[in-house]
Amino acid sequence: MSDLRYDPVFCQWCVIAESRQSRPFEFQEIVQRRAGIDCPFCAGNESVTPPPIAVSPDSASGDPANPSWLVRVVPNKYPALDSTLAIIDQQDPQRSTPGAGHQEVIVLSPRHVVSLSGLSDDELFTSFRVFQERLRVHNQSPAIRHVCIFMNCRPPAGASIEHAHVQLISSPVCTDQVRQRVQRMTTPTDSGDTLWQELLTLEMAETTRMIQCSGGYLVYCPFASRYSNQIRIAPRTTHSFADLPPDSRDELALLCRKWIDGIERCLDDIAWNLIFQLPPTDVPDAPWFVDLVPRYPQSAGFELATDCWVNPVSPETAADQFRKFEQGQSVS
Ligand SMILES: [Zn+2]
């Protein structure tokens, strides 16, 4: 039996319909990296990218005169937004503004690593520190309304380059979707908590969708998951991501690596997106969270027509699968 569920944060309906899993599927798609391509993000190919914005040296490389790097930030060579355009703060009725903004690529390793799950501890912790540092830089720009940090892994998730990298886009526009989501999250409820606090309390009490509840974060499959096997990592503290203390930032990094590894092991190296769901820059202390979204060819006519997604894997089933994964491995 299917279940229509409502997400009051995203204001979206979805249909949990596990019977859809038994549908026949007659097609196959094999995506392979083209041979003979030099990876622009591997160590040794630095000249292929534009000059770096920031470089985190590898302090363990042993050669202070020529340190290798762990993490490298470069401008996006093919940006959707153009950092050379003047950012105009205008409020005309048609809300037109030049496509001005900044788009950076954060290369997570000098090695040809495909996924965040393949990063070393040094690469992982340095990467998350760089995410935080770059967010702070862009948050301080008065014309920037929103900073989006995300990772696309493998082509079905939107990746055009295989080497593990995160993208940061800072925009003079904050979409209504982001602004209204944050307004709903911070709305007080009858219990005296905000809607977001109440939802986290409900997820903790329910337990069937909870995967890991320890330290400073909750890891769970959201009640009204639009996407099959979606995982959400929500901080239990009130720190913004930009202000997270190093130990809490490292804990988040480890959880992201662990549960991306979980998604890849449980779902045959499926493509995925990692999304920092960050608030607008003018409410920097508003709640935030991280979504890990495995990518299936899931949206079809019904979803495009109604914005109501059909999810053939209930979040309860998904959470059970991920808990079993955790029981079978010892990485913390
Ligand atoms: Zn590479």
Image (cartoon, rainbow, N blue to C red):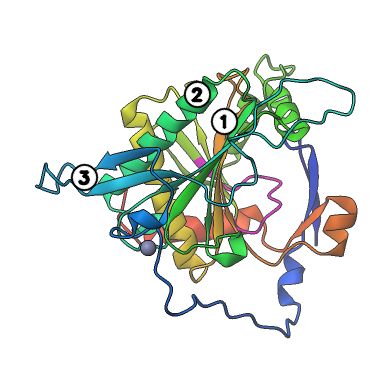
Q: Amino acid at mark 2?
A: Ser
Closer to the observer: label 2 or label 3? 3
- Classified by dominant secondary structure, the portion drawn in magenta counts as loop
User: Which residue occupies 42% across, 78% down?
Assistant: 36
> Which stretch is magenta?
219-229
Q: What x and y, as percent, mark residue 68?
A: 21, 49
Q: Which residue is mark 2?
A: 240
Taking 229 as reference, is 249 above or below it? above
Q: What x and y, as percent, mark residue 112?
A: 35, 63
Q: Amino acid at mark 3?
A: Asp
The Cα atoms of the two marked residues, 1 and 2, are separated by 7 Å
Closer to the observer: label 1 or label 3? 3
- Asked whether residue 261 is drawn in magenta, I would say no
The Cα atoms of the two marked residues, 1 and 3, are separated by 30 Å
* Element class at badge 1: loop
Q: What x and y, as percent, mark residue 7?
A: 75, 40
Q: Which residue is mark 3?
A: 58
Q: Which residue is mark 1?
A: 288
Specify whether 181 is left or right of 69: right
Circles 1 and 3, Cβ within 8 Å, touching? The answer is: no
Whether residue 246 appears in this view of the structure is yes
Q: Amino acid at mark 1?
A: Trp
Q: What x and y, as percent, mark residue 13?
A: 81, 46
User: Which residue occupies 55% across, 60% down?
Assistant: 159
Report crowding for label 2: few under 14, some 14 to 19, many 20 or more residues within 10 A (C-alpha): some
Circles 1 and 2, Cβ within 8 Å, touching? The answer is: yes
Q: Nearer the viewer, residue 36 or 194?
A: 36
Q: Nearer the viewer, residue 298 or 188?
A: 298
